[in-house]
Amino acid sequence: MTGRSRAPLLVWTERGLYCPPGAFHIDPAAGVPCAVVTHAHGDHLRPGSARYVLASVGAGVARLRLGDKAGLETVEYGAVTGIGDTRVSLHPAGHILGSAQVRIEHAGEVWVVSGDFKRAADPTCRPFEPIECDVFVSEATFARPVYRWPPGVETVAEIVRWWHANRERGITSVLFCYALGKTQRVLAELLAFTSDPVHVHEALAGPIRAYRDAGVPMVPTLPAPSASGRQLAGALVLAPPGAARGRWMRRFGEASTGLCSGWMQLRSNRRQSGHDRGFVLSDHADWPALVDTIARTRAPRVLLMHGHTATLVRFLREERGVDAAPLGPGSESAA
Amino acid sequence: MRAFAELLDVLDTTRSAAAKLAAMARFLVLAAPADASWATYILCRRDLTAFVTPMQLRSWLGEAAALPRWLIDETLTDIADLSESIALLTASTTGPETPGAHVDANLSTWLEDRLPMLRALTESGRRARITAWWRMLPYRECVLLNRLLIGELRADVSEAQVVRAVSEATSRSGTAIADLLTGPWQPSEAFWCRLQSQESDRAGGERS
């Protein structure tokens, strides 16, 4: 491992992160010849690239977005692949099924891109593995010290209490969660509390099937009814956040609604959510996890993407003596 | 205190009057009589005793959160709520089920024993006790503790809604409950038993 006198291994371009010696992009914003993909969320995996390199366990969920014809090149976690003049390997990121950090080695220098990641326990995916490197490119979505997650199992216990209290009142509980990742994590965590079936919005069916195909145990699911849902009094129904304000909600009689998200940590966000309850459950690293992870990589240089980069950059520079800087639109390169 | 903290969060988040009423009535039915009485007192926005000042809490936060002053100040500005900021920065995240990580007790124990006992301590003793609570309590209980410490708690419900909830929980008429909650009263197990007792209904009926 060496200092930073050489050309950067990754630069920021209008299509996203680009690795010149490997001639590949990471999570490109548009079609490129070669895309190394950290995970299958829509802001990281987009159609139109000629070649996709991703973790093999994530192939099923990636196909949901790309279809059957896209050129997927799947690799096992930890296996090294030569791309251009670089050696690339993917490592568990703990974000969702198949999520990966990207380790790039070139001329004795190692860069690691975290992708979206979390350190909290999640029964649906392999846990994050810290990797030592020269430069660590980290996400910073929740990089403020107010974001400190309670254990996921505690939050799901609270969801169950809410559901059961609503059942006593004879009303439906509608819980809004992101379709890919959060939904399946809730369904898997629920196994510790119940084997009752949960009803799901039709948009969640594909991702749930992909997780079941990958062998992730979850509570049984049933489709939410297409028209009148009055027979669902007392049931728990999962739906994507977009369904909250549409016609879809009209099918239920009286219902209590909740939203599952890391943003629900703040009282102001809970009050503005328009839901009866806000449940804190995030698939991103909280502040302590970001600070701890950065220390574990032992990287002398850290570049931060997405979210509250300014606060964490200042904290790392002033309190930890780390050479930290933001990376993304507005920063000319990763150097 | 855990159940009451969860109730306050529900009242704070939902806009549904039916959900607020159901949550309050459910809490009051399940709570111990002294807790139900204190909860009613707080929900009716009766005056609370302050045990410390907001400035004291603020000055203890830097060390308790183990963060630099600029980051504390940035957070206080962003969140604009001292009680919540403290809980966000210091509360336990190990979860209430973790043995030893939790010092939960009944709401009445906090209000009748633990908080009044702070008065017998020196300033540094109060600081040590309160910052220890911050570290042990989960977020919602920590927010509630801070509001009780500075005596500023305004639940997002009207007195009429509280009367309806108490009426539902005690199976007594709203008029009888409203009468009993008017004028000065002190929360206690005995007061809650009076609220539940049908005697005053009959007495009221005879008077009218």
Image: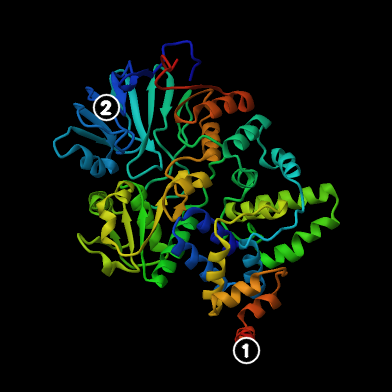
Residue A10 sits above or below residue A173 on the image:
above
Three-letter amino acid code at disc 1? Glu
On screen, residue A282 versus residue B58, left or right, reads left
Q: Chain of mark 1?
A: B
As helix, strand or loop, the secondary structure at mark 1 comes to helix
Q: Quadrant of the C terminus of chain A?
A: top left
Q: Is residue A169 visible?
A: yes
Residue in front for this viewpoint, A255 or A221: A255
The answer to whether A88 is drawn above or below residue B43 in the figure is above
**Residue B15 at x, y = what percent?**
45, 55
Q: Nearer the viewer, mark 2 or mark 1?
A: 1
Pointer 2 with pointer 1, Cβ within 8 A:
no
* Residue at 61% across, 54% down: B154
Q: Which residue is mark 2?
A: A35
Q: Callout 2: residue from which chain? A: A
- Residue B206 shows which numbered tag? 1
Residue A42 is situated, as x and y percent measured from the top left of the image, at: 29, 36
Give left or right: position of B143 versus A11: right
Residue A160: image location, x then y, percent: 43, 63
Residue at 24% across / 30% down in the picture?
Answer: A52
> Which quadrant holds residue A292?
top right
Q: Foreground residue, A182 or B148?
A: B148
Q: Residue at x 59, y 45 (%)?
A: B88
